Amino acid sequence: MVSTTMETLAIRTENKFRTLVTKRAYKMGEVICDIPSENIMDKPSRFTVQVARDKHTHVGKLAALNHSCDPNVILDTENMSMVACKDIAKGEELYFFYPSTEWEMNAPFICLCGASNCIHVVAGARFLPLSTLEHHYLNPHIRDLMIELLHGTKQNLEKLKVE
Ligand SMILES: [Zn+2]
């Protein structure tokens, strides 16, 4: 049974820096918990995850999830669940790839995750090239917004050709 209460997750705080760790091991593909959806806002904040074009859900404990360019969990906003995308050991810190849910973040930052595919500036999917995004799990609202952006770019280029 899937736990919706997140009792397998713990928040660790060190020098005011919060991390989310798991109290048990997970196999790749296993659902870890549901994403809370009781509290939907229309603007992003440090405590929200984008779940649709204009919907940001307050994620409670999951707000302690840090970003990695080589993550071990995905947030699936279609099924509203957090899923292991690697085998995860007990006590490991959990990370997801922020641009997989966030189109435009309100507090961009520099990533120091050290992964060979590190994107360095984490500001949301709209600031990343398709060649980077296509290597990551992306939620449907991010795909839709990306297609729209590309379509808009194509139209603008065509206008330039006409003039
Ligand atoms: Zn990185």
Image: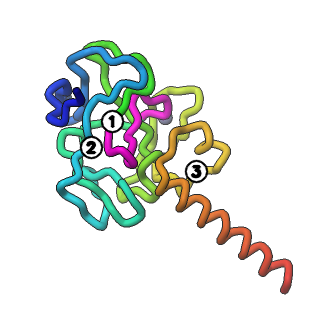
Give residue 35's mark. Answer: 2
Q: Nearer the viewer, residue 40 or 30?
A: 30
Residue 15 x, y percent position in the rendering: 19, 31
Tell me, yes or no, whether the two marked residues, 3 and 1, touch with CB atoms within 8 Å.
Answer: no
Tag 1 residue: 82
Q: Which of marks 3 and 1 is in front?
A: 1
Q: Residue at x 69, y 69 (%)?
A: 153
Q: Which amino acid does label 2 sit on?
A: Ile
Question: In the image, residue 132 lies at what x, y percent?
Answer: 62, 42
Q: What stretch is highlighted in magenta?
A: 68-81
- Asked whether, in this view, residue 26 is left or right of residue 39, the answer is right
State if disc 1 and disc 2 touch (CB < 8 Å).
Answer: yes
Hey, what amino acid is under mark 1?
Met
Q: Is residue 20 above or below residue 162?
A: above
Residue 79 drawn in magenta: yes
Specify the quadrant of the image occupied by residue 42: bottom left
Q: Disc 3 marks which residue?
A: 128
Q: In this view, does 74 lie above or below 162?
A: above
Q: What's the CA distance linking mark 3 and mark 2?
A: 25 Å
Name the N-terminal-most of marks 3 and 2: 2
Residue at 64 percent of width and 49 percent of height = 130
